[in-house]
Amino acid sequence: EGRHMKEKVTWEEHAYLRRLPVEAYRGHAVVHWSMSLEQRKTGWLTDVFHHRFRELLTHTAFRYHLICPCYVLMPDHHHLIWMGHEEPSDQRVATRFLRMQLNRILRPQGFELQKQGHDHVLREESRKQSVFETVAGYVRENPLRAGLVEDLADYSYAGCLVPGYPELNIWSDGFWESFWK
C-alpha cells in the first residue's frame, strides 16, 4: 500500500505559483499581474513611492515594449495590466526587472515584495475591447471595494502608463476612446 502513495510535499518546499509556457507572456500578450508585499505589510505606500513606481514603470514599459492601461497600488499589494505591443516583449522578464527595481526602493524601508507575484494571462475572448474594459474596470475599482475611497477619482495611487502619452488619464470620461486610438 505504501508504495502507491505519493510523498507529500509541504508548502515551503513547493511554494511557487505555476506559470504558463513562456510564449504566453511574449509578444502581444495581455496579463493582469498582482504583487503583494511580504506578510502583506502596509506603510510603504506614499506619494513619493508612487512617483518612483511610475518612473520605474515607465522604464520597464519602454525597455520591454509594454503599455499599462491600468495599475492600482493598494496598501499591501498592487495590480498591473500590461499589454505587449511588439514581438520582442517578454512580460516575465519585464516583471522580474520591475520587481528587482521596486525591491531596491522597498528594502531600505523594511519592506519587500513576496517571492512571486500572481498573474492571469487574458485569453483572446478577454482581449476584446468591451470585455477588456470590464476587466480593467474591475482592477481599477479595487480601492472602492476595499472601502479606501467613496469616489475612485479621489484615489491617487492608480493610473495608466502608455509611454509617449502622458495626458492619458484613467479617470477621464473619454479615457477608453483615447486609449483605443
Image: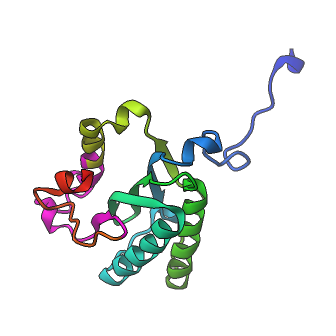
Q: Which residues are magenta?
A: 137-163
Q: Position of residue 65 (x, y in %)?
A: 49, 61
**126 or 36, which is in the foreground?**
126
Residue at x-position 27% and y-position 39%: 129
**114 or 158, which is in the foreground?**
158
Residue at x-position 21% and y-position 65%: 169
Looking at the image, can residue 19 be seen?
Answer: no
Q: Residue furthest top?
A: 1
Q: Residue furthest right?
A: 3
Q: Position of residue 175 (x, y in %)?
A: 18, 57
- Is 62 located above or below residue 116 in the figure? below
Q: Position of residue 94 (x, y in %)?
A: 56, 62
Residue at x-position 46% and y-position 66%: 61
**22 or 75, which is in the foreground?**
22
**71 or 169, which is in the foreground?**
169
Magenta span contains residue 180? no
- Is 122 located above or below residue 179 in the figure? above
Magenta span contains residue 143? yes
133 on left or right of 66: left
Q: Position of residue 66 (x, y in %)?
A: 45, 59
Q: Residue 97 occupies which quadrant of the picture? A: bottom right
Q: Residue 14 occupies which quadrant of the picture? A: top right
